[in-house]
Image: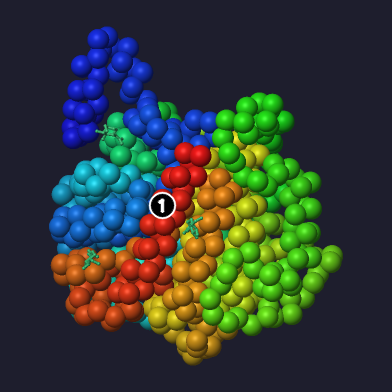
Amino acid sequence: MRPSSWLPAVLGAALVAATPTPTIQKRWPTAFASVADGGFSLNGSKFSFIGTNAYWLPYLNSDEDIVNTLTNMSAAGIKVVRTWAFNDVTSVPTAGSWLQLIQNGTTTINDGPNGLQRLDRLVELAEQHGIYVLLSLTNNWNPVATPSSTPARRDDTASSATPLPRNFLSNDYGGMDAYVREFGTSKTHDEFYTDPTIRTFFEKYVQAVVSRFANNPFVFAWELANDPRCNSTIPTSPTCTTQTITQWHADLSKFIRSIDPNHLVSSGDHGFLCPTCTKLFPLTPKAAPSAAAGGASTRRRSRAAVMTKARLIKKIAEDRRAAPRAADAPTVKIRGAWKAPAKAKRQENGGPGSAFDGSSGVDSQDILNAPDIGFGSFQLLPDQNNYDTNPNDAIVPPSANFGATVQQGINWIQTQAASAQAVGKPLVLTAFGLVTQANEVVFVPFNASTPVNPGAGVSTRKRQTPGELGTGVTDDQRDDAYTAWLNAGIQAGLQGMTQYQWSSVGLTPSDGTFVQSPNAQQQTAGGGTLPQSPNDGYGTLGQAQNAEQGVLQDASQNITSFLLQ
Ligand SMILES: *[C@@H]1O[C@H](CO)[C@@H](O)[C@H](O)[C@H]1NC(C)=O
Ligand SMILES: *[C@@H]1O[C@H](CO)[C@@H](O)[C@H](O)[C@H]1NC(C)=O
Ligand SMILES: *[C@@H]1O[C@H](CO)[C@@H](O)[C@H](O)[C@H]1NC(C)=O
Ligand SMILES: *[C@@H]1O[C@H](CO)[C@@H](O)[C@H](O)[C@H]1NC(C)=O
Ligand SMILES: *[C@@H]1O[C@H](CO)[C@@H](O)[C@H](O)[C@H]1NC(C)=O
Ligand SMILES: *[C@@H]1O[C@H](CO)[C@@H](O)[C@H](O)[C@H]1NC(C)=O
């Protein structure tokens, strides 16, 4: 077991008690985030949270920068920070941190000062700020820079020929495809989930990280992966289905719970649903909390009815019929003008749309019902995914159809809440964000390695016509959308919502990190000349950041008072 500063507090509390042994046993599990009454319990109290994403936070070289960042997060009411507990490299960088080397047919885990000790430090500093850390163990997305920019991986020095420094992007920390490139036989993305060699190497990594923090209650939970799916940058095989992905979750969550029974395990998936897919873990009537079973009477939950397969199909049909009206009658007051929704083609006989048809290989309800998955996860990033039920998946920039974008987000949140309620487990929105006008030029979608360059024919961005400028939303629109979504989530009974993404400014330039002059300055928007944290399209600084943090702070108060009602 690792020494940790929380230990004396817990033991100290136990030692003053009259009967130390039973007290330790009773108190011990309550220090960790756990599930009670359909919500979270943490340190003996009910717990719901507003959080943020900062995948880069452990990989700052300066502890002072981490402290300043956590201080600002805490001031904005942030209780949980979601970050990457992986940082794979294919050759050892000359400077900066890395956690695992994947090379020559094997892996080497770095537990040195520029390795796992950086994670130790983050968790320690987070504890000092009363913030919990949600640790993700790998990433679905890891596109390497195009062959024309050499070296293929990003460099760790400012003189890199590649446009962004190493670790600047969320998808530049290695991940599933890094394992597949090294160990795969057919080199398809889904080998990550099925190939025995790859699974052994991934489990070795998971074992090293998970066992390190098994006794630390300031790790909020383990997240298996960011956005796991069948498809990624490298193609998947035709045999990859929702059952492939669900089985992997069931196996890996069981593995983690065998090493670390203290922490909850979640997926990190995008929340795609598939009411018509074959289930590995079918819902049983007793899994759905009813008033009779005490579910609804002990906790105020989603107002939406419990989502059965039949109800979900019905809701999809209803949403589709309502879609053209959505922008005309938004449920919240929204600043700024928006155009009436582009005439969405109604497809009476089409499929349910990519968020509901299993085409990504994700059936989040089946994943959530796996026995060792403790709570649900989903994301809301309308610049990159469609959440409507229109099978045409009309690609419309959020700014051109703002009211509909907000309403679709609300629908998505309510549908997710109902789905999780049917399973009877808590639910967290692990990432939500909109690309603003200020961020258009720096926006890098998860499946890309360079910013979308309007006019350059990059077609990886969903909902934006390539080359079209002025498609981001205004800062005010972003704040309105976030307010509407946060409110909808709180009302629907979500247990956590983490904004994407946090920004820090005035960081210490250091070789081997993303905080480099001039790269960090050139690649971030929103003003300021001081070195900034990575911004892949959702960061804010200056006045915009103050306004955004105000929204998060309000929501943090609201979610806490909702919890105590
Ligand atoms: C991989 O092979 C190269 C070339 O032989 C060698 O320099 C390097 O140290 C090896 N790496 C590992 C982790 O064995
Ligand atoms: C639990 O509460 C005690 C007393 O307030 C505190 O010292 C400790 O840090 C808390 N632990 C966690 C995991 O929040
Ligand atoms: C990701 O981008 C690559 C090209 O870089 C493309 O071949 C692949 O289909 C894309 N994957 C998804 C899921 O969009
Ligand atoms: C996902 O992969 C399948 C199988 O290779 C392919 O048919 C499909 O077009 C891919 N979807 C996306 C969004 O890339
Ligand atoms: C924290 O917030 C203050 C006040 O807005 C700001 O001056 C400072 O640069 C911020 N620190 C970081 C690391 O972002
Ligand atoms: C917080 O609650 C107030 C009062 O109900 C509401 O006006 C506001 O929009 C809420 N803000 C957020 C971000 O949830």
Q: Is residue 52 left or right of residue 418?
A: left
Q: Is residue 408 left or right of residue 321?
A: left
**Extreme top residue here?**
19
Q: Which residue is mark 1?
A: 556
The location of residue 191, given as percent across then percent down, is: 52, 51
Q: Is residue 461 left or right of residue 142?
A: right
Q: Quadrant of the N terminus?
A: top left
Decide if residue 517 is in sight here: yes
**Extreme right residue here?**
349
Please give the name of the residue rendered at 78% of the width and 59% of the height, measured from the top-left corner: 318
Q: Is mark 1 within 8 Å of ligand 6?
A: no
Residue 158 appears in which quarter of the rendering?
bottom left
The location of residue 521, given as percent across then percent down, is: 25, 79
Please give the name of the residue rendered at 33% of the width and 22% of the height, measured from the top-left corner: 27
| Residue nearest the observer in this picture, 301 or 320 | 301
Report crowding for label 1: few under 14, some 14 to 19, many 20 or more residues within 10 A (C-alpha).
Answer: many
